[in-house]
Amino acid sequence: MGNDTAQTLAIDAFTGPVFRPGDPDYDTEIAGFQTAYTHRPALVVGAVHTEDVRAAVEYAARHDLPIAVQATGHGLSVAADGGVLISTRRMTGIRIDPASRTAHIGAGVRAGALVEAAAEHGLAPLNGSSPSVGVVGYLLGGGVGLLARRYGYAAEHVRAIELITADGRVWTLTPGDELFGPVLGSGGNFGVVTALDVELLPLTEVYGGQLVFDTPLVERALDAWRRWTATVPDELTSTVTMLAFPDIPQVPAPLRGRYVASIRTAFAGPAEEGERLVAPLRAVGDRLKDDVRAMSYTESHTIHSDPDHPHAYVATNAMLDEFTEDAAAALLVAAGPESGADAVVDVRHLGGALARPSEAAIAVDHREAGYIVRIITGPEGTATQARIRAALAPWTLGNSLNFLYGAGSEADEAQTRAGYRPETYARLAALKAEHDPANLFRFNRNIRPAH
Ligand SMILES: Cc1cc2nc3c(=O)[nH]c(=O)nc-3n(C[C@H](O)[C@H](O)[C@H](O)COP(=O)(O)OP(=O)(O)OC[C@H]3O[C@@H](n4cnc5c(N)ncnc54)[C@H](O)[C@@H]3O)c2cc1C
């Protein structure tokens, strides 16, 4: 049988659409949230069912083609140049079981859709800041949620995973299985997740929002937030973001063109207590914006108000053991209002339940980190990122893989390794050699198979 015939036969097995370069809808199918880089595969499989994914993996393995996976494109790291892209955006099924408080979700479900579906049952997932992020991609990186200090990494709440490995085998993994923990924290290195079961929490409200301080108060707000984080209970998770709003009509008038510090808080508890906890931050001074309030959990995406339009960005991060006075001063010099750095920099408070050892042995390290600094720039900003990271080096334990965005050198092996303790990386590399020896799943924060 000629190779062409074999390829045609294999493609006929897919129930979803397939696209090749030059096809009318190829560009639409590969487009994602990240616009600086785009996968350019030789074949895209628009998967609808688990069987489509399995057939695509078998096809790629038979032809020794590398495999990329995309749900939304928020976390694109290494862009595919050739190979097969499995596009999971059509796999949007959500089934809630209120009795066991779990959601069974397809690989293409976005956080906002799961929040809405869970809310119908008085439940909520442990989602992160943006409603348009894919739930599976988020969980495969650990998942630092809005209430992360209270409930720990979202991946700790996964109950079952359907995974297709490079040999085409369909696994149903549950806690205790050898691959279960390693899959949660290593991106798509071990295969394609077609669906998973994740625990929901009986949460209908959250007390949170933003306090935005103008340029003259940035330093004081950062200092107040830093001291305050040492006093708050685990029920409170927060972030301070320093950014310059562009001077464009889409930005609300009070913020337009301003360099600000925006403190974002989320408290899982009674509003009166939340108000009392937030009072020292309000005491910093006048706010350009203050919408901290009791809100329905379905409004929780307003806490960070992440941009929801596709754009070009790269990001790196540094997980810090402590955010000391000296660390804050170093950050202000490197990235503050006077620095001239064209970067959005945020510091998230970690600790609490995030610091606990993992019951499910998920592959997320640096649990002793008290804070994470994220540095987001345009694609030309990698030198700025390196400068800010260098300033934070004395306090840096490593990276968080979920918060590395962008392709090329920023997705290099050193940054991936810095996401793990050496023994974790070695264990993952050994498992990778066992389950994906040809490294078919390499368009990601790649763990090289140990040889
Ligand atoms: C605006 C914004 C806000 C964010 N906020 C948070 C946050 O609050 N907390 C947090 O922890 N993270 C956050 N993230 C990071 C986000 O969780 C990761 O970038 C995640 O990888 C995005 O997954 P995705 O499916 O949306 O993106 P995609 O680009 O589609 O996927 C990213 C990668 O995940 C892997 N992947 C995705 N689906 C599968 C699958 N079914 N099987 C195997 N591998 C798969 C692939 O390697 C893929 O390249 C944020 C990102 C952005 C851009």
Image (cartoon, helix red, strand yellow):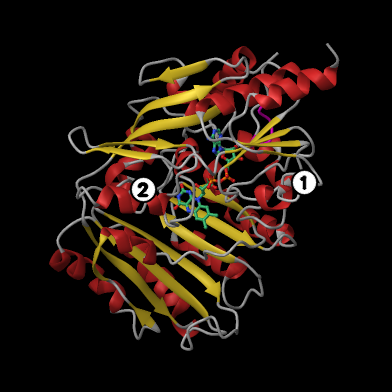
Image coordinates for residue 444, horizontal then vertical, percent: 64, 37
Question: Residue drawn at (49%, 78%), measured in percent from left and top?
Answer: 260
Q: Residue at x 76, y 32 (%)?
A: 83
Q: Which range is magenta?
A: 441-445
Instruction: Give the camera-side residue of 194 and 284.
Output: 194
Comparing 304 with 100, the one in front is 100
Q: Name the residue under label 2.
A: 114
Question: Can residue 440 be seen at all in this image of the molecule?
Answer: no
Figure check: 327 above or below 261? above
Q: Let me know if residue 90 appears in the view.
A: yes
Left/right placement of residue 261 relative to residue 341 reads left
Mark 2 or 1: the one toward you: 1
Q: Name the residue under label 1.
A: 23
Residue 444 lies within the magenta run: yes
In the shown orientation, is residue 440 left or right of residue 100?
right
Q: Dot 1: what SS?
A: loop
Residue found at the very far right of the displayed protein? 2
Residue 94 on image: x %, y %: 36, 40
- Per the picture, the main secondary structure of the magenta-coloured stretch is loop
| Viewer-side residue, 322 vs 378 | 378
Q: In this view, does 426 lie above or below 257?
A: above
